[in-house]
Image: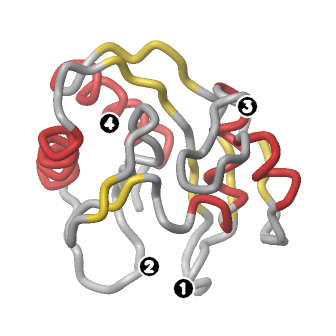
Amino acid sequence: MGNRQLNLELSRKEIGDQCGKVTKLSSLYETAAWGNTDQPSFLNQALEVETLLTAKDLMRKILKIEKNMGRVRKEKYGPRIIDIDILLFNEEIYDYSFLKIPHPELQNRRFALLPLAEIAPGIVHPGLNKTIARLLSDCTDELEVKKYS
């Protein structure tokens, strides 16, 4: 919702200020809405962040950033100002009610895999033991993902 590119820029700045050093960032990618398709296209980007935070503390900071940017959680897969996910956290696996890492749908979502593969193709998914590049090549999601200019 709103100025998608500006929202991503503001969230990158907040992540850098509150969570850790942004060391890599992918290009921006545009994708038709996933889940609830009756809404405008999404912009996606992957970041690599060096942080001293635990995964739980990082998630808490991310949720606060989303809230401060105006995110309101009304409907699943509905329109939103920003949606920040933790896709991977080192080689660690977490399964809490409010935090699941690796993201449980990562291997099924081309819109997440493509930007992640741009910055970390050789990283191995700790639950599936496949590289991100391999997960992308195996992904059956047919939703078009294109670089945004």
- Helix, strand or loop for disc 4: helix
Q: Is residue 8 left or right of residue 137?
A: left
Q: Is residue 35 left or right of residue 130?
A: left
- Helix, strand or loop for disc 3: loop
- Helix, strand or loop for disc 2: loop
Question: Which amino acid is tagged 1?
Answer: Asn
Q: Name the front one of labels 3 and 1.
A: 3
Q: Quadrant of residue 143?
A: bottom right
Q: Please say if the residues under marks 2 and 4 sit with CB atoms less than 8 Å apart.
A: no
- The residue sitting at 79% across, 40% down in the picture is 133
Residue of label 4: 11
Residue of label 3: 121
Q: Please say if the residues under marks 3 and 1 sit with CB atoms less than 8 Å apart.
A: no
Q: Residue 26's spot in the image, x, y percent?
A: 62, 28
Mark 4 or mark 3, earlier in chain: 4
Question: Which amino acid is tagged 2?
Answer: Tyr
Quarter of the image with the N terminus is bottom left
- The residue sitting at 70% across, 42% down in the picture is 132
Residue of label 2: 77
As measured in the structure, the alpha-carbon distance from the residue carrying label 4 to the one carrying label 3 is 23 Å
Q: Residue 111's spot in the image, x, y percent?
A: 67, 56
- Helix, strand or loop for disc 1: loop
Mark 3 or mark 2, earlier in chain: 2
